[in-house]
Amino acid sequence: MVNFMTICMLLRKNYHDDWRVKKEVESLNKRGFHVIVISRRQRGFGLTNIYSMKDKSSFIKEKIIEFHSYFNHLIWNVSIHKFFKIFIAPIFLIVDTFSIIIKAAKQKADVYHCHDYDTLLAGFIVSMIKNKPFLYDSHELSTGLQIPGPLYVQKVIIFYRKLLEKLTLPHAFAVITVNELIGEILEKNYHVKKLFIIRNCPKKIIKIDPVNYATLLHNKKAKVLIYSGFFFPGRGLETVINILPKLNKNIYFVLIGKGEKKYLEKLQELAFRKKVHNRFIYLGYVEHKDIFNYLAGGDCGIFLFEKNRNVSLFLSSPNKLFEYIMAGLPFVSTDGPYFKRIVNQYKLGFAVDENNEKEVIKAIYSILYSAELRKEMSNNCRYAALHEFNWEEEEKKLISLYSSLGKLHC
């Protein structure tokens, strides 16, 4: 095993908000790699911008170096019209990029690991300055993301992202992404040298203590549909609330996670109009270590994202998919290509057309009111999670990648 190699990871969001990065850092750390993370300072987090963390099972410390994002400050602290933010966002991306370059260039790293497109330019520049290799870790298809604002603004931003990836990716030592569908596009478009598919699966969880929703909801007959994660338009939450009046009165829709307050209020208003406000339950944010207990206590996971909203979403394999599987929670999802492939291969639930209300309701009832089918799907989820869809399997690829890079370094 290659030890004492220093990796500098670049991240424009805060380190504590990205479980994929945290898992990668921990895995590399435990294998003897020294990891430095350049990340955005969390809102209201601490007074210093450099500190160390140490995992109890590790002898190596990772160093977290934070930079202040002026755009993040503007978004959260300044009352300003969204339309104006769209036009000034590129300016702050440039400012953040320079901040990342300055901090990264000061580190004595052997390789620079860029997370998502908004750190790619910084990583590429620093790698050229320091004459060191860089990796690109694409958490989603950047050129397929939905972009707010006028059409011409969207076209300019997409053009920039395509040009950036076209100019930099052929020089990357390797490209990492989250599934084969996105990987095929990156390989085809950018002549990638090495491609690694590392899925964003949770760590294995052997013991789960399911939440008792019958007690929580004061209804012994309660059946629970669950959505967990970040919530915002395009995730199909309105669709679920709209069909809730047509479902059995003992069926509840439980929402867990974070999102904009205004959007949550919009969902609650919709539930009031549909007269199902007593069956739409928002539990707030649940710590990651506890989320599987909440999921396992439910009867059916739900994720009816609007697959035609943008290409990235259409091709996605989001965290919640693997969290549902780890929790042994059968689910009803949109019939995006990745979801359809996983569902059909392992029989974990149903992939449906989110616009076909009858098909959605039929799938929900099939899981909720067929105890035998639900048990079979739940067992399939747990088996797939413990044997394939877990971080312990995925981290092997990450370690293999860095071991090969380490041999070249030596």
Image (cartoon, rainbow, N blue to C red):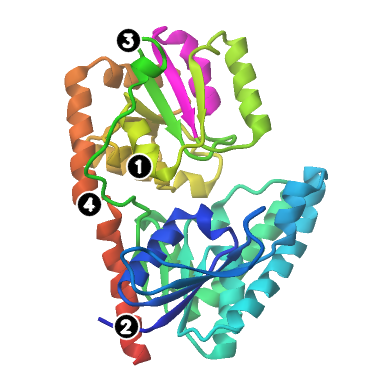
- Residue for badge 1: 323
Report helix, strand or loop for mark 3: loop
How far apart are the alpha carbons under marks 3 and 4? 35 Å
**Can you tell which mark lies on residue 388?**
4
- Residue for badge 3: 220
User: Could you tell me the amino acid type at mark 2?
Assistant: Asn
Q: Are marks 3 and 4 in contact (CB under 8 Å)?
A: no
Report helix, strand or loop for mark 2: loop
Dot placed on the residue nearer the N-terminal end, 3 or 4: 3
Dot placed on the residue nearer the N-terminal end, 3 or 1: 3
Dot placed on the residue nearer the N-terminal end, 4 or 2: 2
Residue 243 belongs to the span the image colors magenta:
yes
User: Could you tell me the amino acid type at mark 1?
Assistant: Glu
Residue 382 belongs to the span the image colors magenta:
no
How far apart are the alpha carbons under marks 3 and 1? 26 Å
Dot placed on the residue nearer the N-terminal end, 1 or 4: 1
Q: Nearer the viewer, residue 13 or 240?
A: 13
**Can you tell which mark lies on residue 3?**
2
Q: Nearer the viewer, mark 4 or mark 2?
A: 2
On the image, the x and y values in percent for residue 50 come to 59, 71
Q: Residues within 10 Å of mark 4 (few under 14, many from 20)?
A: some
**Residue 262 appears in the rendering:** yes
Dot placed on the residue nearer the N-terminal end, 3 or 2: 2
User: Could you tell me the amino acid type at mark 3?
Assistant: Lys
Q: Residue at x 28, y 73 (%)?
A: 400
Report helix, strand or loop for mark 1: helix
**Residue 351 appears in the rendering:** no
